[in-house]
Amino acid sequence: MRADVLDPVVMGVVNVTPDSFSDGGAWLDPVAAVRRGHELVAQGADVLDIGGESTRPGADPVSESEELRRVLPVLEGLAGAGARLSIDTSKAAVAAAALDAGATIVNDVTALRGDPQMAPLVARRGCEVCLMHMLGEPRTMQCDPRYGDVVGDVRVFLAQRLAFAVEAGIAEQRVWLDPGIGFGKTIDHNLELLARLDEIVALGRPIVVGTSRKSFLGTITGRDDAGDRVPGTIATNVLALARGARVFRVHDVKEARDALLVAAATLRGRWAPATTTSKTTA
Ligand code: HH2
């Protein structure tokens, strides 16, 4: 399964949206998005996560046809770019078209709850899938989220979604899990999840962490501009690596990659070149 848990997988974000919280509109033009994807690969991205619908708090849903119109030319333009392609969607039709265009990972922030066709599709295609925890839905998720014990609740949810996926015919070794930082969580919920990440890692699947530029980092540092939150992002990535996280979803690939490689070598106490095979299969 995992040859070396200290071998970080860097997942670079390409948001083909007008309204994403940190880069909305920047890569809406497919030519610009493809150029951005190539740039992230050159910076060391192992995976490109391409999304056509913002999930920021308060975001409005996007139609299937609009989402397809946004992401398909970008996926086609990035097939063969040198990184695995992930489609960030909760719609099975979008995922199916993305897989046809060369994606091999489905990143579903609803953890297969959003579209009943998603689990059978993933099972049929044998692709990898990321199942993320979210309390509520993007429009309302930041309105007073409450948990008994946030880490315990997220862990139970992810274990249940993993069992659901396996029951649906998805191979367990194809499943990645994500605690969903910022999705129906207060700043303290996010911090507790990161502090006790080892309890989520204990589920035995590769753990994806998506803290990149998120607002809790701005609250701690006083940085309102999302682009100024890169050092905060890196602090969380490095600590998450030390606690066993495997995949790091980031906007700033160069900075995150270098920090993670140095952190991994330091944690090991020796330097060894990255093992490509183990990385690409997470
Ligand atoms: N965060 C965002 C979107 N997709 N997927 C996973 N697995 N984990 C995350 O933490 C995650 C995610 C939100 O970030 P971003 O894509 O930059 O913003 P937006 O949703 O506004 O497009």
Image (tube, grey):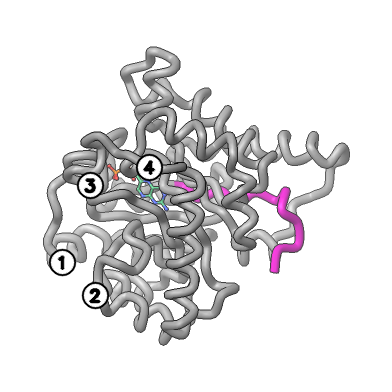
Amino acid type of the residue tagged 1 in the rendering: Glu
Residue at (18% x, 43% y) in the render: 140
Which circle marks residue 147 in the picture?
Answer: 4
The answer to whether mark 2 and mark 1 are in CB contact below 8 A is: yes
Between discs 2 and 1, the one toward the N terminus: 1
Q: Does the residue labelled 3 lie within 8 Å of ligand 1?
A: yes
Task: Tell me which numbered mark, 4 or 1, is placed earlier along the sequence.
Answer: 1
Look at mark 2 in the image and give the residue it sits on: 93
The segment highlighted magenta reads 1-12
* Residue that numbered label 3 is attached to: 138
Pinpoint residue 66: horizontal percent, then vertical percent. Answer: 13, 61
Query: Left or right: where does residue 95 sit relative to residue 105?
Result: left
The residues tagged by marks 3 and 2 sit, at their Cα atoms, a distance apart of 20 Å
Which quadrant of the view contains residue 67?
A: bottom left
Residue matched to label 1? 64
Amino acid type, mark 2: Ala
Tag shown at residue 259:
none
Label 4 Cα neighbours within 10 Å, binned few <14 / some 14-19 / many ≥20? few
* Eye-nearest disc, 4 or 2: 4
Snapshot quadrant of residue 165: bottom left
* Pointer 4 with pointer 3, Cβ within 8 A: no
The first of marks 4 and 3 along the sequence is 3
Task: Reply above or below: 103 against 248.
Answer: below
Query: Marks 4 and 3, Cα distance to the nearest angstrom?
Result: 17 Å
Q: Do the residues labelled 4 and 2 touch (CB within 8 Å)?
A: no
**What's under tag 3, amino acid-wise?**
Pro
Given this view, does label 3 or label 2 mark the residue nearer the observer? 3
Say whether disc 3 or disc 2 marks the residue closer to the N-terminus: 2
Is 199 part of what is drawn in magenta? Answer: no
- Residue 3 lies in the magenta stretch: yes
- Residues packed near mark 1 inside 10 Å, few (<14), some (14 to 19) or many (20 plus): some
